[in-house]
Image (cartoon, rainbow, N blue to C red):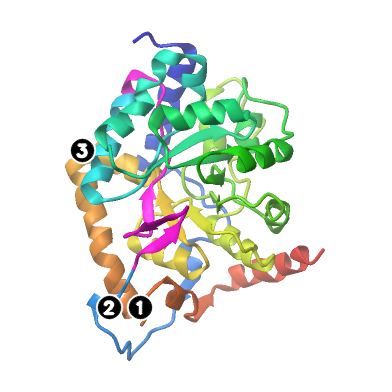
Amino acid sequence: MNESRQSHRKDEHLSLGINLWRQNQRLQVGATYDDVRWLPNTFPEMTVSEANVGTTILNQSFNWPFYIEAMTGGSNMTGRINGQLASVAKRTNLAMAVGSQSIALKEPDKAETFSVARKNNSDGFLIANLGANHPIADVREAIDMIDANAIAMHVNVAQELVMSEGDRDFYWLDNLATIIAKSPVPVIIKEVGFGMSPHAFKQLKQLEPAAINVGGANGTNFAMIERRRNRNNTSFNLDSYGLSTVESLLSATFTKNTHPLIATGGISSANDIVTSLMLGANMTSSAGFLLETLMTGGQSALIELIHQWQSDLPRLFTLLGAKNITDLQHKERLYSSELQNFISQQQKNANL
């Protein structure tokens, strides 16, 4: 398969993203999971076997409240990685999202770097992925490409503006309304690492998506990745822009959001998953941390990590006396003074 300039960009994204995790060069933006503390539950009054960590979202019941988030596709190397991730998803009974499929719409020979996910996981739950500007015809093609069960329409203004070849036109809401109305599968509106403010949740109330992926900061930072790609353009710096996953989940509560929430952005442990669920998420996902694990230790290491999370989650629910996610969301928690300050300011903004 010939490699185009866009394919090379996919490889650059992959390499730079892995290095940010591997070298621990990610910047901390806003409140982290450490800013939320769990209150001890001395008398859980339950057994570990009673903990139901499953969730229902996107018209589907899942045994586990996390999945393998969108990462890649569009080049020979990234296609191999999608195949490996799909095999891991099958072995661990997880859902999986593929990276942006726009390249395969322009270069049909790249479609196999995405369809390999369905080939390697014929019965799995797969999430397609396109940018918010794509018309319904593209959406249908992306869904058919991997026989997707859902599609994420990603919104990534900051990434596009830092990217020298990125979009400069961001009239998206009307198009997303059309996509949601006409898509043959559930539609997720997904941020890609910059989080969502109360204003964004107010705007999404009118769209009625199947779910909102808050895509908070402190995971893979595409503003930083694009700035590193554009070595001659370092003045436009958005490395510290956005809201964290914790802040984004709290922003949803300020606006009384009723849409199912997916928490993505910096999740690297079962504890992070529990805190996300506690703060209102219905589902969580991880991308960069899982990818770095795969690239360092191979499929066996990633499977071992996922199995560890799957072992940890029922025990953590029991620790907190929560028999299910609904119970967990009613558990008391403590916020750091910095996070309390954020809450105070954003509650005022939410009422404007």
Q: Under tag 1, what secondary structure?
A: loop
Quadrant of the rendering where the C terminus is positioned: bottom right
In the rendered structure, which amino acid carries the disc numbered 2?
Glu
Left or right side of 110 for 119: left
Measure how far apart labels 3 and 1 are at the Cα level.
34 Å
Q: Under tag 3, what secondary structure?
A: helix
**Farthest-out residue, right:** 352
**Farthest-out residue, top:** 2
**Residue in the foreground of this view, choosing between 335 and 107:** 107
Residue beneath disc 1:
323
In the rendered structure, which amino acid carries the disc numbered 1?
Lys
Q: Please tell me which residue is depicted at 38% across the width and 74% down the height of the picture.
A: 324
Q: Residues within 10 Å of mark 1 (few under 14, many from 20)?
A: many
Q: Please tell me which residue is depicted at 38% across the width and 55% down the height of the picture.
A: 66
Residue beneath disc 2:
50
Left or right side of 231 for 97: left
Residue 289 at x, y = what percent? 36, 46
Measure how far apart labels 2 and 3 are at the Cα level.
33 Å
In the rendered structure, which disc, 1 or 2, sits on the residue that comes first in sequence? 2
In the rendered structure, which amino acid carries the disc numbered 3?
Gly
**Residue in the foreground of this view, choosing between 225 and 174:** 174
**Farthest-out residue, left:** 300
**Residue 198 appears in which quarter of the rendering?**
bottom right
In the rendered structure, which disc, 2 or 3, sits on the residue that comes first in sequence? 2
Query: Is 141 placed above or below 214 here?
Result: above
Left or right side of 259 for 107: left
